[in-house]
Image (cartoon, rainbow, N blue to C red):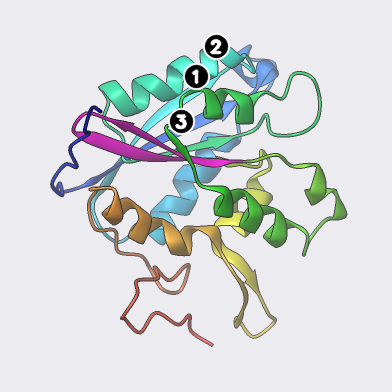
Amino acid sequence: MTEVSVPTQVAGLKIGLVSISDRASEGVYADQGVPSLKEWFARALVSPYETHERLIADDRLTISQTLISLVDDVRCDLVITTGGTGPSRRDVTPEATLDVATREMPGFGELMRQISLNFVPTAILSRQVGVLREIEGHAALIVNLPGQPKAIAQTLEGLRGEQGEQLVAGLFGAIPFCIELIGGPRIETNPDVVVAFRPGQKNKPKT
């Protein structure tokens, strides 16, 4: 059996941002996925990070090759995709993501649909997945997000009440600890946007 070594922590987080859209990649309209993600990370993260952006078509092989490149060559610790997760025949992001995975993280998809159901009943049509891709000396978390900018923020942050209290935990709250467990850098967040949960710490969101 071949063993995969776990890397030591590095100084800054590398994030791959992948927007998947046939028409946006063809220039029919401007992409909103990557700009929305960049804006959110600018608000949410207070520790060092860098982004590597891709705008690609809804093609299974293209998506898989892009994810492999971002993890294996660029050495991203986290890769976020947006778009291509619905039930139409051109929506193949989950399949392409599973193609490059070494292990699936089913809790991510479960939580994303739970969050979205607080806003729209069509959340049950979403097929987003979360996976790990592990190679020698490096590992990354890959997560599929919805394609709409508003839904991206809602999924990452969760659901808050009228007074700002946390009603449903956001997806990103669990990501910093996951990145650390697979050998990535420590991620610090702005608690006014999202609280990074770590066992043994006082991690409760502000109420």
Q: Nearer the viewer, residue 84 or 49?
A: 84
Looking at the rendered structure, the kind of residue marked 1 is Ser
Q: Residue at x 64, y 45 (%)?
A: 149
Asked if residue 30 can be seen in this view, the reply is no
Residue denoted by label 3: 101
Q: Nearer the viewer, residue 92 or 146?
A: 92
Looking at the image, residue 184 lies above or below residue 16:
below
Marks 1 and 2, how far apart in space?
Answer: 5 Å
Q: Residue 197's quadrant in the figure?
A: bottom left
Residue denoted by label 2: 61
- Contact between labelled residues 2 and 1, with CB atoms less than 8 Å apart: yes
Looking at the rendered structure, the kind of residue marked 3 is Ala
Residue denoted by label 1: 64
Q: Position of residue 32 (x, y in %)?
A: 61, 35
Marks 3 and 2, how far apart in space?
Answer: 14 Å
Looking at the rendered structure, the kind of residue marked 2 is Leu
Q: Nearer the viewer, residue 78 or 137?
A: 137
Q: Residue furthest front?
A: 1
Depth check, mark 3 against mark 2: the one in front is: 3
Looking at the image, residue 11 lies above or below residue 191:
above
